[in-house]
Image: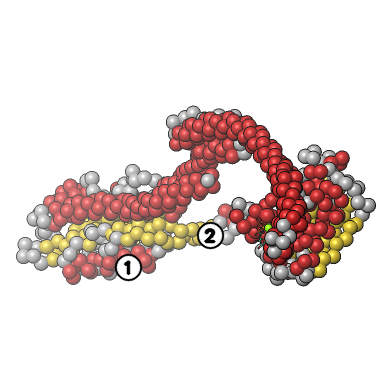
Amino acid sequence: MQKKIIIAIIINVIILSAGLGIIGHLTINQSIDRSLHSRLTLAGIIANNIDLLLERSLNRLYDISLSGKIDLKDNNWKPEKEALQIAYQYSIFTDGIFLMDRTGNIVLTYPSRLENHENLLSNPYVSKIIMEGKPVISDIHTVEPTGKKVIYAMVPLKSKHGDIVGVVGGEIDPTSFRLSQSIEGMPREPNTYLEIIDSHGIIIVSNNPKRVFLSSDHNRFMENLIAQKKPEIRTCHRCHSGAGGKGDERSTDILAFAPLKMAHWGVSIIQPEKDVFAPSEKLRTTFIAFSLGSICIALIIAIGMSKSIVKPVHKLIDATNKIADGDMSKSIAFGGIDEIGILSSSFEVMRVKLADSLEGLRHYNVQLEERVVERTKQIKASQKKVENLLKMVISAEEEERKRIARGLHDETMQSLSALLMKIDMCSKMYAEHLPSEKIDEMRNIALKTLDEIHSLIQNLRPTVVDDLGLEAGIRWLLDKHLAEKGIACDFNVMGAEEKRFNHRIETALFRIIQEAVINISKHASAENVFIVLQYMSDSIAVHMEDDGKGFDAADVLKHTDDVRGLGIMGMRERAYLVDGKLKICSTPGNGTRLSLWIPLPEYGNKHV
Ligand SMILES: Nc1ncnc2c1ncn2[C@@H]1O[C@H](COP(=O)(O)OP(=O)(O)OP(=O)(O)O)[C@@H](O)[C@H]1O
Ligand SMILES: [Mg+2]
């Protein structure tokens, strides 16, 4: 989560910085454009100033030319002198003003000079003005043989008829203050050259006096621009000596050029590029530093903010983990009105409710356990009662069987014996009246009834067990129910010699074996039955197996409430009441195996 917050803030900062970067880049470019444009404008302003100066100077010459006082043929030079004097005052013509006739001869100068007879026809500017009749401002002209540098400003001198009769001109010393004042007062920066160039690329005026009359570094380029009267701003290269005389070094300059209208001159401003762009570079550096600073501050704020957000979340996670581990004791509420504070308050409400619910559950659980214990006690008591009732029922059944057997034996059989005796007496006393067949028939019925009652008494309560013991009882059962049907019985006794047991154990064993034997005879269709009676020191066991058709023992044992299974259910109950264990294994087609184990009373059989 902390990483996500930091990444989100960084992305935002990057997007913001990119936006600011684009704006900054555009602003810096605008600043560069403005810097360049300001230099071009400055060059233009200087050019305009010089144009104005030159125009005013030409006008002074025109004042002479158009004054109507000039007549080169009247040999009266006074008016001409006055005109030249007036024009000379306060003009830029530091080297004087002159009148020249059509043949190029200087006829008058002010201030007057000795070499008035000088002929300037060979001067290309003179011939040009005489030919074309247009004012001229020359480039730098070297006067031979003195080698003096001079600039000529000339206007045509026309007659009343408009013919060119001569020239009015002025000479300007390029090094004079009058011309150089045009660049005076302009901002001066080191390594910046502010110069006036003539049409041959020669420097007329420079803020660096050493460069005056030298050829400009870019004279060819300047010549073209002057010829085209085209302002220009561009980069150029400057060669200069390296520091410590290490050879030539090249640096990049910005050249701003503005042409003049009045002369074939131009104004150039050459300044190192780094100086021109210094404000922009400063702006760029400030902007980058500001951006980096902003990103760093944003990062620190992002980390701080993310920590302040994530810390309570971690605390919340720890607290919820404790709750998950079951520890409800610690409060989760951190306070605060932000989302985390509200969330922690909600969790706290949940914790309190959960703790209450768990407490309630614990309480219910204790109550439930108490009720389970109580119920278990009740069930055990009921079970005990049922057991006792079962015992009572079984013993009552046995008692009832005994009572019925006794009654049949003592009364019914006695009565039948008395009836037989009476029949015998009657057959002897009334032999001639009673047919002997009838007497025999009656006797046979009585004897048969006696046999049946005897058999009934044996089934109800076989006296053989009471009289002769368990083994004899089992043999009697096998003879009576199986051997008579032709089922082969293999009965074996293992262990110690026959013992007599508690009456209840003997009765239980006999009844269980009786039911098993009757089941074999009724359901098994068996041919062989194997029985083992095993005496052990502390218990007695019976194993029975038949090779009959078998049955689904699991199904029968499952449905103990089924009316079908009363016999097997009775076997289990009798075994249970003497703490014994009964196991019946059978599957259809595989015969049936029965195992019965009963502990003897002196070894902890508490029921007996
Ligand atoms: N040895 C056996 N061989 C085959 N089937 C048996 C055997 N013993 C029991 N069964 C089957 O188990 C069923 C349940 O026996 P159980 O003794 O419980 O009832 P019953 O003999 O049918 O009736 P009751 O014994 O109540 O007169 C019998 O109906 C019979 O199908
Ligand atoms: Mg049965």
Coloring scheme used: secondary structure
Mark 1 within 8 Å of ligand 1, using the beta carbon? no
| Relative image position of residue 251 (x, y in whole percent) | 49, 58
Looking at the image, the residue that sits furthest to the front is 432
Q: What residue is pinned by disc 1?
A: 224
Residue 357 in view = yes
Estimate the spatial distance between the alpha carbons at disc 1 and disc 2, rounded to whole Å: 27 Å
Q: Residues within 10 Å of mark 1 (few under 14, many from 20)?
A: some
Residue 87 in percent (x, y) is at 19, 49
| Residue drawn 77% across the image and 66% down it | 484
Quadrant of the rendered structure where residue 443 is?
A: bottom right
**From this viewpoint, which residue is outermost toward the right?**
497
Residue occupying the point 81% across, 58% down: 476
Give me the residue at 86% from left, 41% from top: 603
Instruction: Decide if residue 531 is on the left or right side of residue 572.
Output: right
Q: Which three-letter amino acid code belongs to the residue tagged 2?
A: Glu
Q: Quadrant of the C terminus?
A: top right
Q: Is residue 173 left or right of residue 417?
A: left
User: CB under 8 Å between callouts 1 and 2?
Assistant: no
